Image: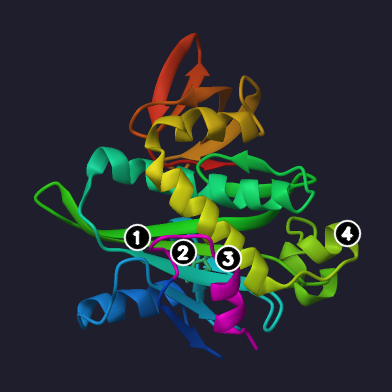
């Protein structure tokens, strides 16, 4: 069970999360957000949150696992028009908001491009942003946030057990998901209001700046040195003496 009023009592925002739709069980909060937008029932800043996401979507067509009653799965709907330039920064701003939340709770999080949230070299959270673009203008933007909160190792499917972690696994303490969700949403609104500092702040949490990374691109494996992010939010990687820009790759 997730209590909407507990999220709202802890929010320090002007518009994000003022309207909350809670579902005890749902396929995917991003999918639900899309249908709410399509039916003209969405409000700017609306949050869709569930206690049990059965069919979570991850980046690059992956699935996203959430421990029923234990993880955090929420989507925030941004309805103001956005230039493509600003919209490319929102996924980074979202990862940054989670990193700051975890730091605020005493963790030492790292970010892996574009927005995997890492604790102790394992993935604790991820972001899936989906948008509707018409004539180079973004009309709606969905920010999907997945965070492993109170899951134990055995709650994860076998294939994830050595790659994923949760706040509980790292500390042996349980965390109130409503509070975590409210802090993420508050940091997210602040980051969105401060587009100019997103890049530098993101890099300050980066797990692999100036380090060797291995990645998949067009079905091949490459390696290079991660040099930063360009103004479009693309990864800049130095391979064979040249710095190349990659819009979408999978960093190992
Ligand atoms: C990733 O692959 O790292 C991104 C994971 C994003 C998962 C979240 S959970 C809430 C929202 N609804 C979904 O179906 N996916 C996102």
Tell me the residue that label 1 is attached to.
Answer: 130
Tell me the residue that label 2 is attached to.
Answer: 144
Please indicate whether residue 142 sits to the left or right of residue 25 in the image: left
Mark 2 within 8 Å of ligand 1, using the beta carbon: yes
Please indicate whether residue 79 sits to the left or right of residue 6 in the image: left
The picture quadrant where one finds residue 8 is bottom right
Pointers 4 and 2 in contact (C-beta within 8 Å)? no
Please indicate whether residue 195 sits to the left or right of residue 53 in the image: left
SS at badge 2: strand
SS at badge 3: helix
| Residue 153 appears anywhere in the view | yes
Residue 5 painted magenta: yes
Pointers 1 and 4 in contact (C-beta within 8 Å)? no
Residue interval drawn in magenta: 1-17
Residue 198 picture location, percent across and down: 46, 35
Q: Quadrant of the N terminus?
A: bottom right
Q: Does label 1 or label 2 sit earlier along the sequence?
A: 1
């Amino acid at each position: 069970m997730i209590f909407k009023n507990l999220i709202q009592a802890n929010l320090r925002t002007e518009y994000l999360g003022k309207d909350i739709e809670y579902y005890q069980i749902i396929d995917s909060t991003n999918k639900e957000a899309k249908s709410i937008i399509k039916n003209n029932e969405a409000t700017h800043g609306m949050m869709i949150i569930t206690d049990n996401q059965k069919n979570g979507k991850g980046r690059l067509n992956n699935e996203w696992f959430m421990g029923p009653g234990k993880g955090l799965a929420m989507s925030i709907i941004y309805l103001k028009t956005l230039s493509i330039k600003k919209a490319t920064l929102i996924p980074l701003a979202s990862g940054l908001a989670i990193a700051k939340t975890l730091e605020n709770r005493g963790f030492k999080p790292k970010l892996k491009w574009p927005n995997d949230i890492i604790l102790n070299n394992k993935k604790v959270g991820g972001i899936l942003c989906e948008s509707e673009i018409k004539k180079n203008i973004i009309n709606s933007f969905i920010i999907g946030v997945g965070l492993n909160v109170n899951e134990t190792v055995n709650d994860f499917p076998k294939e994830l057990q050595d790659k994923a972690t949760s706040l509980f696994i790292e500390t042996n303490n349980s965390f109130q998901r409503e509070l975590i969700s409210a802090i993420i949403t508050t940091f997210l609104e602040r980051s969105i209001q401060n587009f100019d500092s997103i890049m530098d702040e993101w890099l300050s949490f980066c797990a692999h700046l100036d380090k060797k990374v291995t990645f998949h691109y067009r079905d091949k494996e490459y390696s290079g040195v991660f040099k930063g992010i360009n103004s479009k939010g693309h990864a800049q990687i130095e391979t064979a003496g040249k710095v190349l820009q990659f819009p979408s790759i999978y960093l190992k």
